[in-house]
Image (cartoon, rainbow, N blue to C red):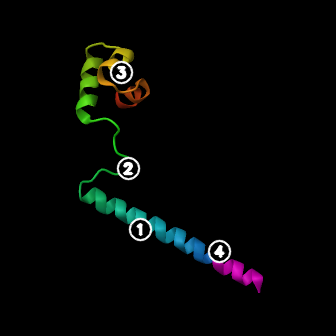
Amino acid sequence: MGRIAFLLLALFAEMERTFTAERAAHARVVAEAAGRRIGRPMAHPDDKIEYARLLKEQGSGYGEISTRTGIPKTSLHHYLQG
């Protein structure tokens, strides 16, 4: 009897996990269709990132760009990759 109860609870847990994933996927699709950005918000404004790209094109190093923009070097590597 205890085994049946355990199996039923496991079944309900799996169903809830599936439904949660479906709801999340649907919410992502709706948000993308509405033009909203999905995921974690950007930590730095776009104008600072563009300024950092300009400085990189002019030959500045990551340390100098970091000092001028206030964006950490690790984030600069992410934003300026490629």
- The residue range painted magenta reads 1-10
The kind of secondary structure element at disc 1 is helix
Query: What percent of the width, then of the height, locates residue 67?
Result: 34, 18
Q: CA distance from mark 3 to mark 2?
A: 25 Å
The amino acid type, in three-letter code, at marker 4 is: Ala
Q: Is residue 67 visible?
A: yes
Q: Position of residue 48 (x, y in %)?
A: 26, 29
Q: In the image, is residue 8 above or below residue 36? A: below
Circle 3 or circle 1, nearest the eye: 3
Q: Which residue is mark 4?
A: 10
Contact flag, marks 2 and 4 (Cβ < 8 Å): no
* Residue in the image at 59% along x and 72% along y: 13
Res. 82 visible in picture: no
Q: Main secondary structure of the magenta part?
A: helix
The residue at 38%/50% (across/down) is: 39
Decide: marks 1, 4 in contact (CB < 8 A)? no
Tell which tag, 3 or 2, sits nearer the viewer.
3
Residue located beneath label 1 in the image: 23
Residue type at mark 1 is: Arg
Q: Earlier in the sequence, mark 1 or mark 4?
A: 4
Which residue, given by chain and number where applicable, does mark 3 sit on? 66
Query: Taking 12 as reference, is 39 left or right?
Result: left
SS category of the residue bearing label 2: loop
Work out how far the residue at label 2 is from the one at label 1, CA to CA, in angstroms.
16 Å
For badge 3, the amino acid type reads Ser
Residue 47 in the image: above or below residue 32: above
Q: Residues within 10 Å of mark 1 (few under 14, many from 20)?
A: few
Amino acid of disc 2? Gly
Marks 3,2: beta carbons within 8 A? no
